[in-house]
Image (tube, grey):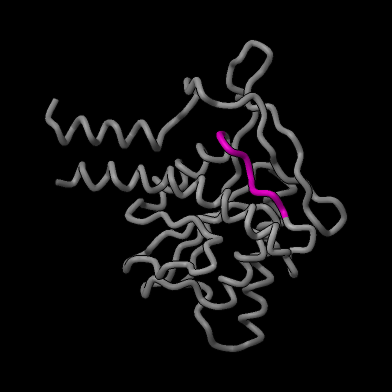
C-alpha cells in the first residue's frame, strides 16, 4: 500500500466505528430535560461484559446556515426558534445529542443562528461548525468545535465518536446567564473534542500530499 493509502486508512480509522476501541469508558454523561432546563444523566457505553452498548447511538441534527440568511427580523426570530426547537426535540429523543452547523458560503453563521447554537451549547449540546465553501471564521467565544477541512460526513462520524468517548457537555444552570466557572468548564470540554478534530485534520492533510 502506498504512503498516501496508509494515511487515508488512518484517517478512516479516526472517523469510522469505534466498537472495538479499548479506551472507551463504561459510562458517559448524556442530557435529559428537567422542566425547561437540561441536566446530566449517566449512560452505559459498555455492558457488564465490556461490550459496546449497541442501543446507545448518538443523535445528530444537521442545520444549514444558508437557510438562515438575514432579512425580515420576524423570520430571523422564527429561524432561531426553529433551531432551538430542533435541538429540544433531539434531546427528548436521544440523550447523546449533538449538532452539525454548516456555515454559509462566506464561512459565517448568521447572528440568529449563532445565538441559537450558542444557547444549545450552554444546554450541554456539542456543536460542530462545518464550512460549506470558504473556511469557517474562528469562534472567539471558544464554544463551538471547528471541523476544519473535514466534510459534513466526516465531522458527523467524528462527533458521534467523541460523544461516545466523552459524553455531552456540562449544561449551565441558566443557559441565558452562564457563570464564568461554567464557561471555563465548558471551554475545557470543547478543547477536548477539538483535539480529536485537529488530529483528524492533520491526518487528512498528510493524505492529500
Callout count: 0
Q: In the image, is residue 93 above or below residue 85?
A: above
Residue 132: name its quadrant. bottom left
Q: In the image, is residue 4 above or below residue 77?
A: above
Residue placed furthest toward the bottom: 72
| Residue beneath the point at 55% across and 34% down | 165
Residue 130: name its quadrant. bottom left
Q: Nearer the viewer, residue 110 or 141?
A: 141
Residue placed furthest toward the right: 35
How far from the left and from the top, in percent, is residue 156? 47, 46
Quadrant of the rendering where the N terminus is positioned: top left
| Residue beneath the point at 50% across and 37% down | 161
162 magenta-colored = no
- Give the side of residue 158 with respect to residue 32, left or right: left
How far from the left and from the top, in percent, is residue 184? 63, 57
Q: Main secondary structure of the magenta part?
A: loop
Q: In the image, is residue 69 above or below residue 87?
A: below
Start-end of magenta stretch: 165-171
| Residue beneath the point at 78% across and 63% down | 174
Residue 89: name its quadrant. bottom right
How far from the left and from the top, in percent, is residue 183? 65, 60
| Residue beneath the point at 48% across and 67% down | 139
How far from the left and from the top, in percent, is residue 9? 27, 31
Residue placed furthest toward the left: 2
Amino acid at each position: 500500500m502506498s504512503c498516501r493509502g496508509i494515511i487515508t486508512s488512518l484517517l478512516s480509522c479516526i472517523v469510522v466505528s469505534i466498537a472495538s476501541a479499548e479506551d472507551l469508558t463504561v459510562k458517559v454523561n448524556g442530557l435529559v430535560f428537567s422542566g425547561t432546563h437540561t441536566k446530566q444523566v449517566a449512560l452505559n457505553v459498555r455492558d457488564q461484559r465490556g461490550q459496546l452498548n449497541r442501543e446507545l447511538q448518538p443523535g445528530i441534527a444537521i442545520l444549514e446556515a444558508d437557510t438562515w440568511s438575514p432579512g425580515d427580523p420576524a423570520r430571523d426570530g422564527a429561524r432561531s426558534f426553529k433551531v432551538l426547537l430542533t435541538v429540544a426535540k433531539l434531546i427528548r429523543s436521544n440523550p447523546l445529542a449533538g449538532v452539525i452547523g454548516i456555515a454559509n458560503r462566506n464561512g459565517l453563521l448568521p447572528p440568529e443562528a449563532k445565538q441559537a447554537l450558542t444557547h444549545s451549547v450552554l444546554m450541554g449540546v456539542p456543536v460542530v461548525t462545518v464550512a460549506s465553501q470558504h473556511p469557517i471564521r474562528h469562534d472567539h467565544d471558544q464554544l463551538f468545535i471547528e471541523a476544519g477541512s473535514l466534510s459534513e460526513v466526516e465531522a458527523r462520524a467524528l462527533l458521534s465518536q467523541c460523544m461516545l468517548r466523552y459524553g455531552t457537555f456540562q449544561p449551565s444552570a441558566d443557559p441565558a446567564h452562564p457563570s464564568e466557572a461554567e464557561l471555563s468548564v465548558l471551554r475545557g470540554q470543547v478543547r477536548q473534542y477539538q483535539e480529536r478534530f485537529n488530529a483528524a485534520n492533520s491526518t487528512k492533510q498528510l493524505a492529500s500530499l
